[in-house]
Image (cartoon, grey):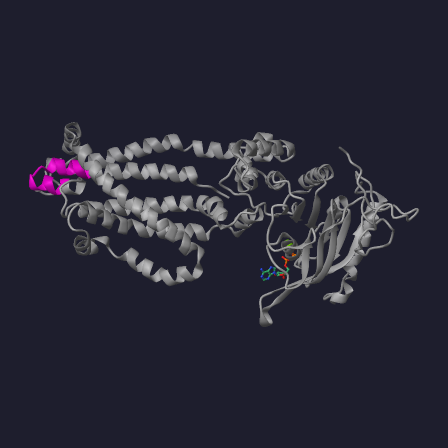
Amino acid sequence: MSTAPVAARRIVGTQWRSWKPRLGDVGLKLLGVLAFLSLWQAATSAGLLGEAFGADFGPVRGLRALGRLAASGVLVEQSSASLGRLGLGLGIAVLIGAPLGVLVGYSRPLDAATSVVFQFLRMTSPLALVPVALVAFGVGSRPVVFLVAFAALWPVLLSTAHGVSRVSPIWKRVVRGFGGGDRAVVRRVIIPATVPDLLQGVRLALGVSWVVIVPAEMLGVDSGLGYQILDARDRFAYDELVATILAIGLLGYLTDLALRWLKERYSWSV
Amino acid sequence: MERVRQAPERDGADQRTSRPAPSGAGQVGVRRTVLGDAIIVVDGAGRTFGRGNTSVEALSATTLEVYEGEFFCLVGPSGCGKSTLLNLIAGFDQPDTGRVLVHGRPVTGPDPRRLLVFQDYGLLPWRSAIGNVELGLEIAGIPREARRSRARALLERMGLGAFEEKKPHELSGGMRQRVNIARSLAVDPDILLMDEPFGAVDALTRMGLQADLLELHRAGGKTVVLVTHDIEEAIYLGDRVAVMSERPGAIRATVTVDLAWPRDRTSAEFTHLREVILEHFRLVPERCAPEYSI
Ligand SMILES: Nc1ncnc2c1ncn2[C@@H]1O[C@H](COP(=O)(O)OP(=O)(O)OP(=O)(O)O)[C@@H](O)[C@H]1O
Ligand SMILES: [Mg+2]
C-alpha cells in the first residue's frame, strides 16, 4: 500500500529520537547529584554554614545514620506510617476530586459557580486549617490524613476538570453513533481521555502532600517521618535529622517517579 | 463476488428523484431497477441554527429518497448544508421542518445500523488500531474473543494486518481512514453515511480508498450516502449523484450515473456526466428558492 512507508518512517523516526539523549541523561543526573552532595558536605565540614551546623549536618553522617535507621527497622516503620497517611489522604482526594472534576469539566454552569470557591480553597494553606482539623478530628492520624486530603484535592479536581474539557466532542459522537449512552461515553471516552490529566493532578497533589504531611506529623502523632524529625531534634541526633530529611526527599522522588511512569503509560497523543 | 449492479431509474434524461417502478411491471424496452425500496426518505426537511437575526438557515425543505443497496452521492458548494443533512439522517440532529424516515420510521436518534463515518476519523487516540475497530462491538456487548477476531479480519481486509497494534498518531491519514471504515463495518450497519471521507488524503491514496470502498459496497450490499466536494469521486462511486444548491441548501438536481464498472474516469461518458453536473452548479443561483429544488 502506498501509505505504508510514510508511516513506517515516522515510527522509526520517533524511536530514534527518544532513544538518543537517554544515555547522556543518566550520566548528567548522577553528576548533578554528586556535585550537590559534595558542595553540601564541603560546606558543613568546612564550617561555612556557621558553628551550629557542623559535620553532623553533612550528607556523609546523614547517610550513615540513614543506614543505621534502615538496619534497625525504624526507617521502614516511620516511612510506612507516613506513606500510609499520605496514600489514604491522596486516595480520598482522588475519590472526591476525580468525579467532582468530571462534573465540573462537563458542566459550564457548575464550573462557573464553583471556580472562585475552588481557587480560593486551593490557595488556602492546609496548615492554616490545623486548629480546625484538630477540633474536628481530635488527635492522632485522622487530622493528618484530613490535611493531606485537603491539600491534594484541588490539584486533582482542577486537573481532571481541565482534562474533561479537552475531550473532543467527536469521540463522544462516535460512541453515541454506535448506540452508546451516557455510561458508555463516560467509560470509553471521558475516563480514558482524562486519566493522564488526572494522573498529572495526582503528581502535583503528591508534591503538595509531602509538603503538608511533615509539619502535620509534628502535631499530635507519635509516628511518621515528621514526628521523627522533631524526635531527632529533641535528642540532639542531628545526623538522624538529616537522615530523615534525606528519606523524605528520596521517598518523594521515588513516588513521583512511579506516578510519572504511570502517567506516561496512559498518556496519549493526537 | 463481482455481482453486477444496476443503477435505479435508467430512463435517459430523467434527473428527478423518483421511486423506481417495481421490476417486471411490464414496461417493454426499459431496463428497470433491481434495487429495493426507498430506505431513506427525507421529506421536506429543513434546519435552521440559532434564533432571531443571528440565525442561519443551513438546509431548506430538502426532499430526497435513497434506495436500499444504492450508492448515493451528494455534492454541493461548501457550507450548503451537506453535513447538516447527513447529521439529520444519522439522528444526531432533528429537522425543524419536514421529516426524515429510515425504514419508514422517523429518525429519533443515532443507531448503529445507520452509521456516520466522520471525515476526521474520530479515532480514539489512546486505543490501538484494533482497539478502535472493536469499539462498536464492545458497545454492542460482543464477547472479547469474537470481537478480536472480527476486528482482526476487517483490518486484514483493509490491508492493515501489520498495523493492528499501532496507535492512530502512528498511522498515515489514509490508514486512519481505513481503520475508521473498518470500525464502521465491524458492526455491520445497513446504511453508511460518509461525510467527505477522503477529503484529507492525497490523490493516489484517495483513489485506492475509493476502489476499496466500491468493492466493499458491491460485496456487502450496504446502502451508502457519501458527501463529497469531488465531482469525479461522486461519478466514480455513485449510482446517483445529487447536486445541492448554495446555502440554504436543497437538492438542485439528481443525476443518474448509468456507467458500468469498472468506471473509466477518462471515458467520454464520464466526462459528459462531469459536464452535466458542473452545469448544474453554474445554474444554481446565489439563493435558491425552495420550489426550485426537487
Ligand atoms: N451547530 C451549528 N450551529 C450553527 N450553525 C451551524 C451549525 N452547523 C452548521 N451550521 C451552519 O450551517 C451551514 C451549513 O453547514 P454544513 O456543515 O452543513 O455545510 P457543509 O455543506 O457540510 O459544508 P462543507 O462542505 O464545508 O463541509 C453553515 O453556514 C454552517 O456555518
Ligand atoms: Mg461538511
Residue A152 in sight from this viewpoint: yes
How many marks can you see? 0
Q: Is residue A160 above or below residue B251?
A: above
Q: As rendered, which of A107 and B143 lies closer to the eye?
A: B143
Residue A42 in sight from this viewpoint: no
Quadrant observed for ligand 1 in the rendered image: bottom right
Q: As drawn, is A101 to the left or to the right of A81? A: right
Secondary structure predominantly adopted by residues drawn in magenta: helix
Q: As rendered, which of B173 and A72 lies closer to the eye?
A: A72
In magenta, the rendered stretch is A228-246
Find out whether residue A241 is within the magenta segment: yes
Q: As drawn, is B146 to the left or to the right of B79? A: left
Quadrant of the frame with the C terminus of chain B: bottom right
Residue A26 is situated, as x and y percent measured from the top left of the image, at 34, 31
Find out whether residue A2 is within the magenta segment: no
Q: As drawn, is A2 to the left or to the right of B274? A: left
Quarter residue A122 falls in = bottom left
Q: Is residue B127 above or below residue A185?
A: above
